[in-house]
Image (spheres, rainbow, N blue to C red):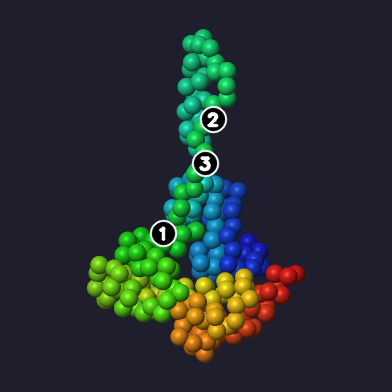
Amino acid sequence: MRKWVASLQRPIGVVAINDKVARYVINAAMELELAVPEEFAAVGMENEELVCLQPTPPISSIDLGWRTVGAQAGELLDEMMEERKPPTEPIFPPSARLIPRMSTDAFQVDDEHVALALKFIADESHRPIKVRNVVDHVPISWRSLERKFQDCRQSTISAEITRFRMERGKRFLVETEMLIKQVAEACGFANSRRFCEIFKRSQGQTPERYRKERVATLQH
């Protein structure tokens, strides 16, 4: 499983046949130290809470409504055993629904203040925001928010801002033909030099090299 997960082009989302398989996939991603869900997201099926909720991160799942189907079938059987006429038309249960959890939602964290901060960072990552801007958006002190980020994300506010900007930049590099200067501006950087410095520091290669390798991989 680890070998297969490592071979996938990221960022990517995986739909598993059930929650147990989704858990195996997410466990492999965590062992490979991939960022879930930013680099690797997964969703299961059946919404088995014992599987979905433990351990961390919780797994998003598609609730297929088996309990509702069973209850409706039982009611119909009871009516038929009472010699009532069966329905002439099919009975359709409610549509399946997605139960979002942390394996697909970057903002599904246990702490409401951290979730609010992450949502703000994601929405404003195209602007030159700083830690102060994030703190001003959340109704707690700077120190308290930093502590919550360490507890929930094992990261700092500043690092999360950089991570969102880098993810945004990687998408632009692969999915568009924007110039590096344009990508830098779209990610909230004052100039391309600063963008290139931080990109190389965080990704281990220049934006130009990243684009060339990813585009070549997609073409094959």
Quadrant assignment, res 130: bottom left
**Disc 1 vs disc 2: Cβ atoms closer than 8 Å?**
no
Q: In this view, does 215 lie above or below 199?
A: above
Element type where label 2 sits in the image = loop
- Amino acid under label 3? Ala
Q: Which of 61 and 118 is in front in this view?
A: 118
Q: Which of 48 and 131 is in front in this view?
A: 131
Instruction: Report the residue marked by disc 1.
Output: 108
Q: Which residue is drawn at 70% across and 72% down?
A: 217
> Is residue 186 found left or right of 128 in the rendered image?
right
Q: Position of residue 198 (x, y in %)?
A: 50, 85
Q: Looking at the image, tell me whether mark 1 or mark 3 is earlier in sequence order.
A: 3
- Amino acid under label 1? Gln
Numbered badge on residue 92? 2
Instruction: Report the residue marked by disc 3.
Output: 96
The answer for how far apart the CA atoms under marks 1 and 3 are is 21 Å
